[in-house]
Amino acid sequence: MNISKIVSLLENNDIIELGTLAYAKRREIHANNNIVTFVIDRNINYTNVCTCKCSFCAFHRDKDAKDAHVLDYETIKAKIDELVAAGGTQLLLQGGLNPDLSLEYYTNLLKTIRKDFPDLAIHAFSPSEVDFIAKNNNLSPKELLQEFINNGLSSIPGGGAEILHDEIRTKLSPNKISSEKWLSIMQTAHELGLKTTATMVFGFGEKYEHIAEHLLKIKNLQAKTGGFTAFIPWTAVPGEATAHDYLKVLAVSRLVLDNIPNIQVSWVTQGLNVAQVALNFGANDFGGTMLEENVVRAAGCVNNTTASEIVRHIEQAGFRAAQRDTYYRII
């Protein structure tokens, strides 16, 4: 599939047709096609101090701001205790690009979490964080990732991709890594044996060609490495995309990314009802319970849920809910 073919799909405003095609593709890929998975997880933002200052981010703070924070381990452990008590299996750790944090902060954090919670998957540090921490410590991304793996890192989230087209990235996030660097760090992670997710944030006023290029870059890297477990598209908050746009892009993502097994809904940005509809547009995973979410919330989008509510929405859509782990294995 080439860019012009993807653009023609995105130009099709008959989302019922697109949804039907995407749902058929989902059934081709998944033998147990009546199952929709979800994970019990928590997102802990260890710091909100960030020098990147993306134009769309309301979460970042300067280090001297009154509400700037760097979480100590006692605070983080209390949050993880709540996650484990709720049956959680995945911890998502993400933070701002904070130049004052030493390498030891990160390695000690990983090491201590792994010691205290040996069975918990630590899904942490987006490519932007990896690049920043590596540069801050005179390491290559490969050297840093190996150090993180040695101290307990399980996998990497796909954050910071936004749109993998540098014209868009320069407008939105002039201080963030290039699309080539994002892809390079993901490839390195895969080569080191880490599984990762991939994401796309749209609704910034980009063109269909930009979305198409993003999807093809993800598809081509997956063809090389096979390291992506899932793709998660979501809409910018605030942004220009509607629910109609979201369902269209989700369906096209399923059609294009036929070498990535899982497509995840974004109930955090779309709400539970649209996420439920998305299960008929090619998605097969409902994402995580997200016992804590701060970045999208800071932008004014507040959606909450529980494991039982996720199960109910999956079953109401005619599917069978199944709890999974980070690697999409059913528990």
Image (cartoon, rainbow, N blue to C red):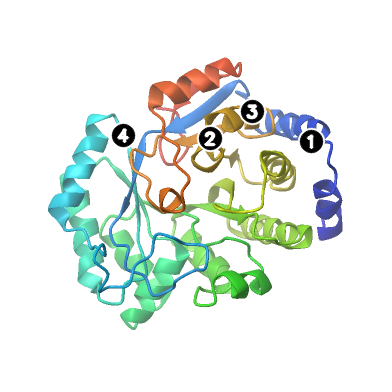
Q: Residues within 10 Å of mark 1 (few under 14, many from 20)?
A: some
CA gap between label 2 and label 1 equals: 19 Å
- Placement of the C terminus among the 4 image quadrants: top left
Q: In the displayed structure, would residue 37 be above or below residue 191?
A: above
The residue beneath circle 3 is 277
The residue beneath circle 2 is 271
CA gap between label 3 and label 4 equals: 25 Å
- Give the left or right position of residue 43, taking residue 192 as reference: left
Q: Nearer the viewer, residue 126 or 45?
A: 45
CA gap between label 2 and label 3 equals: 10 Å
| Most distant residue in the left direction | 74
Q: In the displayed structure, would residue 204 be above or below residue 262?
A: below
Q: Residue at x 25, y 74 (%)?
A: 64
The residue beneath circle 1 is 15
User: Callout 1: helix, strand or loop?
Assistant: helix
User: Callout 3: helix, strand or loop?
Assistant: helix
CA gap between label 1 and label 4 equals: 35 Å
Question: Residue 247: horizontal and vertical position, in percent?
Answer: 69, 38
CA gap between label 3 and label 1 equals: 12 Å
User: Callout 2: helix, strand or loop?
Assistant: loop
Q: Earlier in the sequence, mark 3 or mark 4?
A: 4
The residue beneath circle 4 is 88
Question: Residue 122: horizontal and vertical position, in percent?
Answer: 32, 49
Q: Which residue type carries mark 4? A: Gly
Q: In the displayed structure, would residue 99 be above or below residue 215?
A: below
Q: Residue at x 69, y 47 (%)?
A: 257
Q: Nearer the viewer, residue 80 or 302?
A: 302
